[in-house]
Image (cartoon, coloured by chain):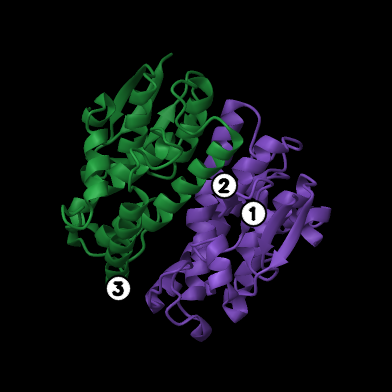
Chain colours: A purple, B green
Amino acid sequence: MTLIFYDYSKAPSPRRARIFLAEKNVPHKTVEINLMANEQMGDAFRKINPDCTVPALQLEDGKILTDNASIAAYLEEIYPEPPLLGTTPYEKAVIASWQSKIDHEFGMAVASALRNANPAMKDRSLPGKHNYKQIPELSIRGLKQIDNFLNFLETHLQEKEFISTGKFTIADISAACALDFARVVKKKANENMHPNIIRWRSGLSQRKSFNI
Amino acid sequence: MTLIFYDYSKAPSPRRARIFLAEKNVPHKTVEINLMANEQMGDAFRKINPDCTVPALQLEDGKILTDNASIAAYLEEIYPEPPLLGTTPYEKAVIASWQSKIDHEFGMAVASALRNANPAMKDRSLPGKHNYKQIPELSIRGLKQIDNFLNFLETHLQEKEFISTGKFTIADISAACALDFARVVKKKANENMHPNIIRWRSGLSQRKSFNI
């Protein structure tokens, strides 16, 4: 039985897992779950992932991993090459730290900015099976967080090709997916203010995994 | 040079690292950073952790880990016994998933509920070096998330001693620290509604690491 990857090609969260799978050349079958049609909330997908989110990955023995954290941890063990979570204890630590930082200060900021302002996402302030009403001020806070993170990342990337450890890692995947998706809230790296971010992101575009 | 652990004994986030260190019996020196006196924002601590947050851990070579994610990842490698992040690929995956779930749906919910309502935390809607103004509706959303998570955890813990993999793991540490801290927003496990959570939490109280 092959791995089954539950994806939605337009969303940033499953894109992170899709790039991770591609970088490690993991053979798998893809099933598209149409979030725009609310397919993730239906009974069929609820049996696969009760949290009603993508990505999810069904393993060869039928077990299912239901988020990016578990998919990355599992695949790094089974397909160690190329390493994307670090090899030495210190590398593993700093990459875990970047993942946490990018999640809290950037990925979730973009999600907050979108989910709390888009009329199509009424009551969808958070992903998952519970409805929470939109909080317009939270969208505004998200936009400020994005500005702060981009300024921080710009300084960090001076003379660096990658975010952490001098190598391509999951931190580059997470940050690039959040950056690309930020266009939905009209935020992007600016030629004058963020030349290092633009250089870093252009470098990633050379990778096959970023073009599937 | 010994490890230096930057702690604040009353806060839930450094408590997670403190328990992790204790479970693995890691020799270290502790330095208390008084968050109530805003010591984390001062120049001295900014040189240690520019993010102005605890926990932080200075390693033997002087490098500094600046959050729970990196501290756990590092210590698990250097002090593998007892394993707290899992041993098999699948265990590592499900524990990573629990960590993400507890962080997003519980730990951050408690933080949101507190930070967006407490008058003493004006402009401290989020931890870290940037100020963001309080959003009262976000406090209310946090309280709802706590209720939803406790209901979910109650069902999950039926006939289970620990949250994940049948063993004590970092998931128990993270969830218990969030639960204990939830008292600051008047939320706690209820004898009638959450008997499994109360049984699980009582079991953890037998551990020395939960009593330091």
Residue A31 percent location from the top left of the image = 71, 65
Q: Residue at x 43, y 45 (%)?
A: B51
Work out whether residue A189 or residue B211 is closer to the camera in this orientation and state it. Answer: B211
Q: Residue at x 44, y 31 (%)?
A: B84
Specify the quadrant of the image occupied by residue B124.
Answer: bottom left
Q: Mark 1: which amino acid?
A: Leu
Work out whether residue B103 or residue A192 is closer to the camera in this orientation and state it. Answer: B103
Residue A81 percent location from the top left of the image = 76, 36
Q: Are marks 2 and 3 in contact (CB under 8 Å)?
A: no
Q: Which residue is mark 2?
A: A70
Residue A23 percent location from the top left of the image = 77, 47
Q: Which residue is mark 3?
A: B137
Q: Nearer the viewer, mark 1 or mark 2?
A: 1
Q: Which residue is mark 1?
A: A57
Work out whether residue A135 or residue A2 is closer to the camera in this orientation and state it. Answer: A2
**Which residue of the protein is positioned furthest toward the top in this rendering?**
B1
Label 1 marks which chain's residue? A
Q: Is residue A139 above or below residue A189?
A: below
Which numbered disc covers residue B91? none
Q: Nearer the viewer, mark 3 or mark 1?
A: 1
Q: Residue at x 48, y 20 (%)?
A: B79
Q: Is residue A24 above or below residue A16?
A: above
Residue B42 visible to an observer of this rendering: no
Report the Cα–Cα distance between label 3 and label 1.
35 Å
Report the Cα–Cα distance between label 1 and label 2.
9 Å
Q: Residue at x 75, y 50 (%)?
A: A2
Residue A80 percent location from the top left of the image = 72, 35
Q: Mark 2: which amino acid?
A: Ser
Report the Cα–Cα distance between label 2 and label 3.
31 Å
